[in-house]
Image (tube, coloured by chain):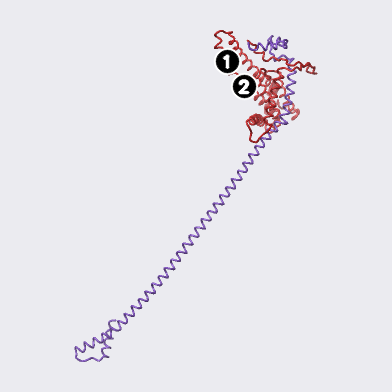
Amino acid sequence: MAGSSEHAVAAGETHATTEAHGSGGLPQFEFQHWGGQIAWLLVLFVILYVLVSRVFAPRIRGVIDERASTIAGALEAARRVQAEAADQTRAAQADLAEARAASHRVAAEAKAAAAAKTAARQAEEGAKLAERMAEAETRIRASRDAAMSQVSGIAAETAAAIIEKLTGAAAPAKDVDAAVAAAQGAAH
Amino acid sequence: MADPLHQFQIQKLVELPDVTVPGLGLVDLAITNSHVAMTLAFAVIVGFLALVTARPQVVPGRLQSVGEQLFGLIDNLTESIIGHEGRHYFPFVFTVFTLVLAMNFLGLFLVFTATSQIAVTATFGALTIGVVLVIGFAKHGLGFFKLFVPSGVPWVLLPVIVLIEFVSFLLRPVTLTLRLFGNMMGGHVALKVFAGFVAVAAVGGLGWLGVPVAIMSFGMVTALTALEFLVAFLQAFVFAVLTCIYLNDVVNLGHGH
């Protein structure tokens, strides 16, 4: 049976105690063994207490605190970097807006300059054309006046010739001229 | 069938002379299996903690993580129950917890369970209450007795309440002792009984009936072993929790009640 060999080994040393537990009591209540166990447990307890409180707990607490501070430091650094990046983004956006405004301004200026140039050119061309037209008109008027001044000579000659044919006598040139001038004035 | 109580027998391994301690009487200094079990538990704890804290790293390895979990378990316990002063009492609670835990667990691997000895559990119980008493009187002097007088109780009921509180305080070391002792002993007796059935069946003591008996008993032993691992941890944890609660009673005496 299991444990019977243990029995045999232990039988010699624990004869007195096996009798006690054979009589129905628990082996735990054999009080002659209490003193040694209690004393030894107290010794072990005190040693372990001193070791824990002086060595092990400070070491573990130290590394846990160190980890906490490391994490806090890393978080702090990350937050700082993030803020920096946000600042840079804001600055870049401001730069961009400024550049956009500048380019708009330059474009408007260029447009205005081009428009002014075009207008000036147009005005110049217009003036040139107007001058040429005026010149042409004066020339036309001069040639018309010349033509008109020859018209009275022709009319006087024609009138003298008609008078000669009708009356057979030549009319005085002075009267003819006066009549032509009067007719011309009436026609005008 | 093997005697299921035999496993609790104290056996002397090395005889040493008896000494007479005044007040205690005759004390046998012999080294017994109980001494060996306690010392082994102690050695396992010290070895484990030494390994864990040998080269502590900010990014912990596996072993260090386990050690820190164990540390954090008790640290949170003392911090949450006792409050910000809990840190002072951490080493005591941690020592109690690890010793009980190691003795419970070694009992499941070896042949002797130190915490199934009432002498051992009584020492833990008395030690805890002793520390509670020392701290109580050191911090509050005679004000310690306010522990038995809850505030806001009508004066008519006061004598009864004080009596109840006093008796319950006296019973604290007893319940601490017997809870741990009973759990460990009961579990090991049950294991031994069912294992005994298997052994009896195996040698043919029950004939053909032995086959189902052995199978069922073996299943029982397996299940009970798993349960005993849980109990081993739980009882150590319960002991630590109660230690914290009793410490809290005297550390924060008068406020927080």
- Quarter of the view holding residue B2: top right
Horizontal and vertical percent for residue B240? 67, 26
Mark 1 falls on what kind of element? Answer: helix
Chain that the image shows in red: B
Position of the N terminus of chain A by quadrant: top right
Chain A tint as drawn: purple
Comparing labels 2 and 1, the label whose residue is closer to the camera: 1
**Residue that numbered label 1 is attached to:** B218
- Quarter of the view holding residue B151: top right
The lab-note entry on whether marks 2 and 1 share a chain reads yes
Give the amino acid type for the residue marked by disc 1 in the picture: Phe
**Apparent side of residue B28 relative to residue B192 in the rendered image (left or right):** right
Position of the C terminus of chain A by quadrant: bottom left
**Apparent side of residue B38 relative to residue A147 in the rendered image (left or right):** right
What is the C-alpha distance between the residues marked 2 and 1?
Answer: 17 Å
**Apparent side of residue A164 relative to residue A24 in the rendered image (left or right):** left
Q: Nearer the viewer, residue B76 or B134?
A: B76
**Residue that numbered label 2 is attached to:** B229
